[in-house]
Image: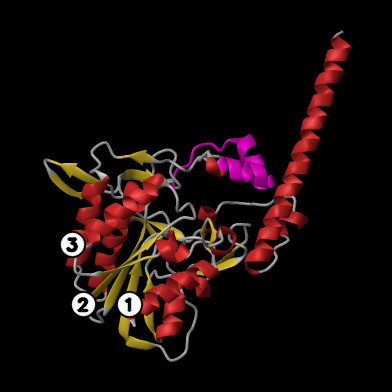
Amino acid sequence: MRINLAKLIIANLLIAAILFMLAELAARAFWTTRTCLRDGCDYSTLVNLKISNERTRKYGFSRYDKNLGHAPKEGFDGVVDIPEWRNARVTINEQGFRSNDKHESINSDNKTLAVGDSFTFGDQVSNNETWASCLERKTATKFDNGGVFAYGAAQAVKRGVELTERSAAEPYSRIILSILVGVDFARDRLSYNSGFPRPAVVKKNGEVGWDAVPDPKTLGTRYNPKQPNAVALFLFQRSLLANRLLDKLNFDAFGDLLTTEHPAAASRDEIAYWTLDKFAEINVPEKVIVLQYYSDLSSKSVLEERQFLLKALSKYPFRHIDTFELFSGKDPLIYWNGHHTPAGNALVCNAISEKIK
């Protein structure tokens, strides 16, 4: 009886293993097909057992910043060779801006500063595929890409203030703030976001303002990670299915994704109005806000926040560009890969170009 039970267990385990391998192969084939439909076939997941050596944060293009929490690491230049990034080249110049790659006949006297989160920085695309790079080509004027991955909207404005003050001798003519609807203001409530310490927007004694950046060496941050989960890490690096599932569950396989909300965090509405007020105070003649979105445009929380922001923006003098209708009905396979693909960034670029020309 025990022998038969053991055989049954082994047989079921073998069947489960075979089914998992078939599902893994199907997932890799599907992923490869998606890349072919989007912008050129990438066969890396079909020819390599190990799909990921490290996450993007391990590539070293960020550094600790005592005022902002983290910032792009000046002088970084490298290729990110994991599936989601598809060998994208990331270059940070000596001023801390994402490179647009070299363009001819650029007018540096009429400069624009772009600030925002990863949708501005250009996660998952190469230097010349960001919307800032596209705008520099289309307008033949200088665009400084000051976007930073994992930033909130208020945090981006804080960086915008620092960068405009730093360039006072050669002032900007325009500043563009990109806001990821449904995400960025929630980030501004956090003390730690995905392992990065950050300045939360808090309300104390009835006043909304910045809290200090907390200790970067707190256990679980990118600067002091916990012991990685060996099994989860093994699966994350070798299984596309497990990789996606662990990401969806926000499972911290590497031990460095600490995320905590500040106990005195201001509300979403308070943070939004306070951020817009601070943006209005920046000493730059022309101000533009761009609303961007993840591919789930039907999310109830996103739709609610969009309406709230459109109403709030009507009270301010600066122009805004809402990309919601632009992307409505668009094929997610073509225009998103988590973040915008090169095609998605081109749409954003064209929309901004039409507004500012």
Secondary-structure class at tag 3? loop
Q: CA distance from mark 1 to mark 3?
A: 24 Å
Upstream in the sequence, badge 2 or badge 3? 2
- Can residue 160 be seen here? The reply is yes
Above-or-below relation of 261 to 113 = above
Q: Is residue 326 magenta?
A: no
Amino acid marked by disc 3: Lys
Q: Residue pushed farthest left?
A: 205
Q: CA distance from mark 2 to mark 3?
A: 18 Å
Q: Report which residue position mark 3 lands on.
A: 315
Q: Main secondary structure of the magenta part?
A: helix
User: In x, y percent, where is residue 350?
Assistant: 44, 76
Of residue 162 and residue 313, the one placed in the foreground of this image is 313
Q: Mark 2, mark 3: which one is toward the viewer?
A: 3
The part of the chain drawn in magenta is 223-246
Counting other residues with Cα less than 10 Å from the Cα at mark 2, is it few (<14), some (14-19), or many (20 or more)? Answer: few
User: In x, y percent, where is residue 62?
Assistant: 44, 59
Marker count (numbered): 3
Upstream in the sequence, badge 1 or badge 3? 1
Q: Residue at x 76, y 48 (%)?
A: 25
Q: Is residue 224 magenta?
A: yes
Amino acid marked by disc 2: Pro
Q: Report which residue position mark 1 lands on.
A: 112
